[in-house]
Image: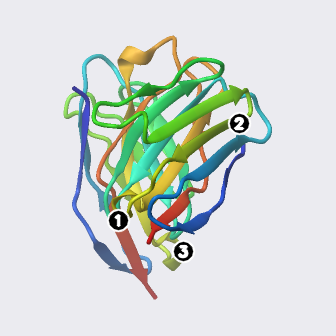
Amino acid sequence: GNSVTQMEGPVTLSEEAFLTINCTYTATGYPSLFWYVQYPGEGLQLLLKATKADDKGSNKGFEATYRKETTSFHLEKGSVQVSDSAVYFCALSDPLSRGSARQLTFGSGTQLTVLP
Amino acid sequence: GAVVSQHPSWVICKSGTSVKIECRSLDFQATTMFWYRQFPKQSLMLMATSNEGSKATYEQGVEKDKFLINHASLTLSTLTVTSAHPEDSSFYICSASSGPNTEAFFGQGTRLTVV
């Protein structure tokens, strides 16, 4: 079946540090890939996505590139801020669900804390 | 993006009682809604998928008689936790989609505590 493996946290960084959160996946076919962010006490918000190989998703300074050869979608940000502290989830959409609403498979989440 | 509202955001109930959680799409018609459960410091586990006007499809291991899902309109789905027990305490999140191959938008979640 489909699966998403995420770098275990928690991750603690100083403000303006470089961030990488690793994500690899297993799926049959060609899934779409997503990063979601969850702030304390809130639901999930879509951060960025990529729908095909070599696509780069980007938003709010975060980037991730869909690498089919390594089945990876690592999240990066060049300079993190305190406000980036949250839990980050990597996810994929079921390629078998084409023609129906997307069903997402999530990674375990990575807690990021950015210190001033 | 589209807005999905979940209510209540938190609820405390006694063991043996039932609790209803609502998920509403505010500015679009949601033909499909998903219900997830999230344990502390863990990922989201899909519980069930509901399509408007039809019965929900439950994931393996999810008790359909305990977690009743109703999706009676294109803007509202409800999850009722029946005869709640402390082990049902969790964070429940819904998401809604307007059609095939479209993005699903998430509600803000409901923290359920059963005492």
Front residue of A16/B42: it is: B42
Question: Hey, which quadrant is residue A103 in on the image?
Answer: top left
Question: Neighbour class for label 3 at 10 Å: few (<14), some, many (≥20)?
Answer: few
Label 3 to label 1: alpha-carbon separation: 22 Å
Q: Is residue B93 left or right of residue B77?
A: left
Numbered circles on residues, count = 3
Tell me which numbered mark, 1 or 2, is placed earlier along the sequence.
1
**Res A25 visible:** yes
Q: Is residue B23 above or below residue B99?
A: below
Label 1 with label 2: CB-CB less than 8 Å? no
Q: Secondary structure at mark 3?
A: helix
Q: Residue at x 36, y 26 (%)?
A: A53
Q: Is residue B40 left or right of residue A83?
A: left
Q: Is residue B19 left or right of residue B114?
A: right
Q: Chain of mark 2?
A: B
Q: Is residue A104 above or below residue B81?
A: above
Tell me where residue B50 appears, x and y as whole percent.
54, 27
Q: Which mark is residue B40?
A: 1
Q: Are marks 1 and 2 on the same chain?
A: yes
Q: Which mark is residue A83?
A: 3
Q: Residue at x 29, y 30 (%)?
A: B60
Question: Hey, which quadrant is residue B11 in on the image?
Answer: bottom right
Which quarter shows the N terminus of chain B?
top right
Label 1 to label 2: alpha-carbon separation: 27 Å
Q: Are marks 3 and 1 on the same chain?
A: no
> In this figure, which residue is indicated by the disc labeled 2?
B76
Looking at the rendered image, the disc whose residue lies closer to the viewer, 1 or 2, is: 2
Q: Which residue is the extreme one toward the bottom?
A: A116
Q: Which residue is the extreme one toward the right?
A: B27
Residue type of the residue flagged with mark 1: Pro
Q: Residue at x 43, y 42 (%)?
A: B66
